[in-house]
Amino acid sequence: MKKITLAVPSFSGGGAERVMVTLANKFYEWGYSVDFIVKTDAGPYKNDLHHKINKISLTDENSGRLRKRITAVFRLWRYFRKSKSDVIMSTLRQFNVFVFFVRLMSFSGFPLIVREADTLDRIFSNGGIRNKILLFSMKVIYKRCYGVISNSLVTKNDLLDRLNLPSKKVNVIYNPLELATIQIKIAKQTKPLSKSVVACGRLNSKKNFSDLIRAMPLVREKFPDITLTILGEGADKVNLEKLSAELGLEGIVELPGFVDNPYSYFAKADVFVQTSLWEGFGYVLVEAMACGTPVVAY
């Protein structure tokens, strides 16, 4: 039996984490032995991982930051030394760098594939010494990995251009989608009589939800009863709630946080809107379309 190892920082509510859990469950269903490595064993997708998949947590929840880092290095090093896995795939760039260096220290020989879920806009737009070190590390490391997977052609071209990778090193594999599961979760959903807009994603500056909120007073001039629901958690939640209040949109803009079944919201909405400043794939766009909901994105 072939063994596949998947590695991701946590079970937090982002697209990359959802992709890895979906892949792990499907690989297990297909008959592979699966190890699932997480640096932090926490997040809303934790319970979605099949209970028979071997989960390896690299840190203890109650440890301090320094101890967590040391523990993560040791446990991952020990895994590489003892594992008989046929291949490991890691995702999210900082974690990819971490996995590569620990694997190097362990003198492990099995192939490492890194997955990139986004373009490198943040590194170049923010600058700073940490981002420069990360960029340099990626330029060195990605060339030495067995392969690089990008989630779209845009992401691949961005990697080729900014990391100077050979084209044959990077393969495009689009994000997986469980269409049958989505159809089950939206069964018998009906649209309300009033108009509604829905958006979904981590509440941060990249997703740019403030633009969407500012547009609502204009939209309400034509559709006075329209509402906006933004699904997700993040550091900008308080600011977005404050902006909604300043524009007199209390009761019109809702931020319910992370929800277990976003598809029911997508299916009931008249339109799904994505205002991200950049995306590698735009996972929620495809999910909204799978629910039959029209999409506006910019």
Image (cartoon, rainbow, N blue to C red):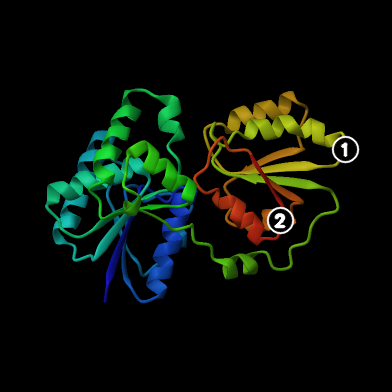
Above or below 204: residue 166: below
Which amino acid does the dot numbered 2 rest on?
Thr
Q: Residues within 10 Å of mark 2 (few under 14, many from 20)?
A: some
Q: Amino acid at mark 1?
A: Lys
Q: Earlier in the sequence, mark 1 or mark 2?
A: 1
Dividing the image into 4 quarters, which one contains the N terminus? bottom left
The quadrant holding residue 185 is: bottom right
Q: Which residue is mark 1?
A: 222
Task: Using residue 179 as the reference point, say whether residue 49 is left or right of it.
Answer: left
Mark linked to residue 212: none
In this rendering, does residue 177 appear at all?
yes
Q: Residue at x 59, y 70 (%)?
A: 180
Q: Which mark is residue 293?
A: 2
Q: Residue visible at 38% across and 45% down? A: 92
Look at the picture and state if 290 lies above or below 160: below
Give left or right: position of 257 versus 69.
right
